[in-house]
Amino acid sequence: MSLPPGAYDDQAQADQSWATPRTLPGDPVAKQSIRGTSTGAPTNLTATVVNANGIKLAWTDHASDADGYLVESKPVGSTDFNAIELVDPNINTCGIVTLPNEKNAAYLIRAFYYGHSSNIAHLTTGSG
């Protein structure tokens, strides 16, 4: 996805209601578990340019048991995807106000679920 040229504009970003994560209406699709070997992975990811620094992502939700979705970006020249937003289950659209290095980037949506809690880490600092 490539955004048009232009610096960040406070006036253009004053109303960011377009970026609010939400569930788009539509025909329900068959849902599958994302645990185990079946795949409830999101499909049909689309990106729409909203302004010089904003894109709106939308996808088809197939997960019956996701705890949410992780939105990741990989700017051109980067070797890895990085998490940029976490949205609730059953959400299938959100907006991203991009950083300067994200004006030309690839985006990825991952359904996730929480595993078992880890052990608790304890740390004491200072001399008491």
Image: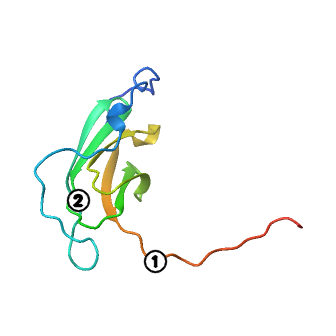
Checking the image for residue 108, the label placed there is: none
The residue wearing badge 2 is 42
Q: Quadrant of the N terminus?
A: top left
Would you place residue 108 above or below residue 53 in this image? below
Q: Is residue 53 left or right of residue 127?
A: left
Residue kind at label 1, given as amino acid type: His
Q: Earlier in the sequence, mark 2 or mark 1?
A: 2
Q: Quadrant of residue 115?
A: bottom left
Helix, strand or loop under label 2: loop
Classify mark 2: residues with Cα within 10 Å, few (<14), some (14-19) or many (20+): some
- Please tell me which residue is depicted at 23% across the width and 66% down the height of the picture: 64
Q: Position of residue 61 (x, y in %)?
A: 22, 57
Residue 111 sits in quarter: bottom left
Residue 124: image location, x then y, percent: 78, 69
With 83 as the anchor, is 108 left or right in this view? left
- Quadrant in which the C terminus is drawn: bottom right
Q: Amino acid at mark 2?
A: Pro
Q: Which residue is mark 1?
A: 116
Q: What residue lies at 43% left-to-right and 20% top-to-bottom?
A: 11
